[in-house]
Amino acid sequence: MLRGMWLATAHGWHQSSNGLCLPIKQSLIRRTTQRWAKFHSSRPAKVHHQDADLVYPEPSSTKHKDLPSFLQYAKTTGLDPNSTTYIGTLYEYTVALSLEKYGFSLRRVGGSSDYGIDLLGRWSVPSSTEPLKVLLQCKALSGRIGPHLIRELEGAFVGAPSGWRGSGVVGFLVTERPATKGIRDSMGRSRWPMGFLMCSREGEIQQFLWNRRAEEEGLTGLGVGVQYSHDGAKNSRLTLTWQGQPFDVQPGTGDGGGEGV
């Protein structure tokens, strides 16, 4: 069974009965990755003391560490924007940046013998007294996705670094396309705590769901909905809910706060 299926309607917040959170239909002006980079490069770096007990693998590259530095590296080296390296790396950094506002604090760690893990970190949510440890596989794919990706994610749990084994760990598959029925069914049957995220290349989170095992690891009471601004769907966005009410996370803090709004 999949969780996280909350929808916003004119009558309030309701849980979806069919287990599917449809992608948001938005008529928005696309924010470019350059604007993301300009905004975040001007902010002071934050020290996450909660990561002191976790040992992260060495990054696959020492030439860049976040979206702004990667864009600069790509410009300096003349990296082909159409290459799989450029597209994949850009997508991973974009996902990490986009998930900050949902309480995630992530580092890019993809490399050889990584079992397909691209991002590692923590997720602070009001449903858990301690931040959950998370591992993410990012698939910058425009083609077909299917249950084989869930099997790959299950393998990532087995090969995860020591700090991301045992209880309190949730894995996520992140793609540019919505979850298929096969993916949802495979997640529902899996014995591993996992979820699915749909994230566009522009960084818009458009689908967010997880299975019962993930709920048991610390997501009880947490849901997902669509929050609309006063001008309607133009600026609607996916938001997390806590006990049926939406709550906000300040970008870059990685701290859910637990306060309803």
Image (cartoon, helix red, strand yellow):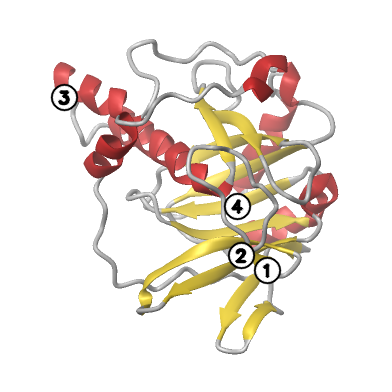
**Local crowd at mark 4 within 10 Å, few (<14), some, or many (≥20)?**
many
Viewer-side residue, 226 vs 4: 226
Residue pictured at 51% horizontal, 15% vertical: 112
Q: Amino acid at mark 4?
A: Phe
Q: Is residue 256 above or below residue 220?
A: above
Residue 14 image offset from top left, x and y in percent: 68, 79
Secondary structure beneath disc 3?
Answer: helix
Q: CA distance from mark 3 to mark 1?
A: 43 Å
Q: Which mark is residue 202?
A: none
Pointer 1: what residue? Answer: 245
Q: Amino acid at mark 2?
A: Val
Q: Is residue 190 visible?
A: no
Marks 4 and 3: which is nearer the front? Answer: 3
Question: Is there a contact, CB below 8 Å, between mark 1 and mark 2?
Answer: yes
Q: CA distance from mark 1 to mark 2?
A: 7 Å
Compared across the picture, whether 47 is left or right of 193 comes to left
Residue 1 image offset from top left, x and y in percent: 78, 63
Secondary structure beneath disc 4?
Answer: strand
Q: Quadrant of the C terminus?
A: bottom right
Q: CA distance from mark 4 to mark 3?
A: 32 Å
Marks 1 and 2: which is nearer the front? Answer: 2
Pointer 3: what residue? Answer: 75
Q: Amino acid at mark 3?
A: Lys
Pointer 4: what residue? Answer: 196
Viewer-side residue, 170 vs 250: 250
Marks 3 and 1: which is nearer the front? Answer: 1
Marks 3 and 2: which is nearer the front? Answer: 2
Q: Amino acid at mark 1?
A: Gln
Q: CA distance from mark 2 to mark 4?
A: 25 Å
